[in-house]
Amino acid sequence: MTSPWQALARPRYLRTRWPWRSAAYLLSSAFTGIPVLLAMVLLAVFSLVGVGLPLLLLVGLPLAAVERWRLRIVDSEPAPSPHRDPAEPGVLAWARLRFTEQATWRELAYAVLHALVLWPLDVLAVGVALVAPAGMMLAPVQLAMDGHEARVIKIWLVDSYPEAFALAVGGVVLLAVLLYPLGALAGARAAFTRLLLAPKESEVLRSRARLVDSFEAERRRIERDLHDGAQQRLVALTMTLGLARLDAPPGPLADRIATAHDEAGQVLVELRELIQGIHPQVLTDYGLGAALEDVADRSAVPVDTDLDIPRLPGQVETAAYFAVCEALANVAKHSGAGRAEVTAHHRRGRLEVVVRDDGRGGATLPDSGSAAGAEGTGLTGLADRLSVLDGTLSITSPPGGPTALRLEIPCRPCP
Amino acid sequence: MPPLSVVLAEDSVLLREGLTGLLARFGHEVVAAVGDAGALPAAVASYRPDIVVTDVRMPPAFQDEGLRAALALRAEQPALPVLVLSQYVQRSYAAELLDTGDGTGVGYLLKDRIGQVEEFVTALESVAAGGTVVDPEVVRQLLRRRRDPLEKLTPREREVLGLVAEGKSNAAIARALVVTEAAVGKHIGNILGKLGLPQADDTHRRVLAVLAFLKA
């Protein structure tokens, strides 16, 4: 069992530790709620005199860390931090990253809610569920201490032991009944905490990432098979034909061998280009910079390059590489440009690639998932691929040009 | 050409045997043929060949182990001639190889070239003799893009430089361009001058010009 909700559905709920874990979870809310409330008040006062505002905005960070840890009382599933590690050392880089993360603002919202509303409610709920039945159960004791009458939990006036014991039994029953809503409340609180502080990536996104990965692995496998199989055999074939051509006496036979030899050579060239299109080995061996220089070398439209990139994770290099290939192919096909430029830099934990051309403009990026026009289908696939890596693709292309396609992917350099 | 002793590294059995036979046909002897890059240094140490011929991509990881092994050999023995066979047109591979030693006695050829049997053997012999050979296809791709240090060259001079990079002699260039050898000499003089290469012995300056060409 991993949560109070699941435990509630079992017939033996009351005999497990779950009611008590739920109560402990709700009660311990005060231990984080009160300090956060005090910290917020203090920082708010400091903010009035001009300091402390950034700290006030970041107050959700430590709270969230403790709350994720506290979640373990009722939720055995891990609650990973949604924050990224800063790519550069230093407090400034850290703060810059935190202030741009959605998670930081969700955590701030949680902090405000928790300090003002949630922890008092949690404690109140435990109070009602435990204190009232306990008071009833203690009715005989209260009566014994008092002598002849007692007012149980300030409601019932009791003046005889049968009445007192009846109330005590009623207290046990009430406790058993109230432990159910208590468990439900703890489950709801845990779910709410998880939703705000440790949201799961959607299953769709994860399955798409898996799909891209396996697609890439498959491309590499095909490339390897072609390289080690067909390509080597074709080289051997042209070698044999080359030798035969050397030995054949002049005549029609020699001419045919020469034709076969030339054709085999042509097939080799085509096969090499095909393999290059499936997976460029230069990307694996030398990285994105060298691979982009090569794309620029091969482009039909003259391309200037300005590249300054370290080695990056394979997925990032591959996605950026194919995006630039597609962009340059579009430049050649549609833009009417006479010149293009590819710039790529890695700054502040992001890879930034821009492909510009001096063409006629008017290019668009079709909505992902819509029935894209023939012009944009390639880019749609690339945008999907980038989104798996948390990357973005944007295009500015006013009628008359120029067009600039920009892609950004958060990533850290490989050592 | 005296017979050359060759150490060959190539993981495809078919090509290993084919190349051994092909070289034998031209009087050269493959003294050792190994199937992975790891075995190459030992083979070179025990046979002391005139030239090493190696594939770029080899076991165990099937990335660029062959090229890495060639670079390591050149770092240790800068005068050891090495001919690298490859399926990749990208200039990064060739540029890294030409960076070893002083850029002489190295060659980078596409495997396609093996099929042009006579040209292949000529290239091999030229590398063994201390020449520099870059595959025409790699050169062609370089020529497609205008590059800063080469902007000053006229189209004709760029063409001549491309042929120099392929390891061709002045006479061969003259034949290819249908001009006199003297005209080729003049072009080369202009190229060396425009690239600002120091006055030294001519072979070395030619190699430097090729390097400038590849790295630009």
Image (cartoon, coloured by chain):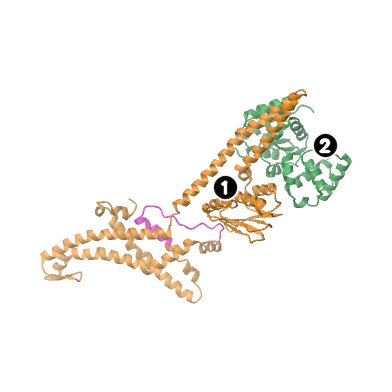
Chain colours: A orange, B green
Pick out the residue farthest to the top: A249
Q: Which residues are magenta?
A: A64-91
Q: Amino acid at mark 2?
A: Ala
Q: Amino acid at mark 1?
A: Gly
Badge 2 vs badge 1, beta-carbon distance below 8 Å: no
On whether residue A83 falls in the magenta region, the answer is yes
Q: Secondary structure at mark 2?
A: helix
The answer to whether A24 appears left or right of A93 in the picture is left
The answer to whether A44 appears left or right of A401 in the picture is left
Q: Nearer the viewer, residue A79 or B115?
A: B115
Image position, residue B155 (x, y; %): 80, 48
Image position, residue A115 (x, y; %): 39, 68
Confirm whether residue A333 shows in the render. Answer: yes
Label 1, on which residue? Answer: A314
Q: Magenta part mainly helix, strand or loop?
A: loop
**Any mark on residue B172, and which?**
2
Q: Is B154 drawn above or below residue A91 in the view shown? A: above
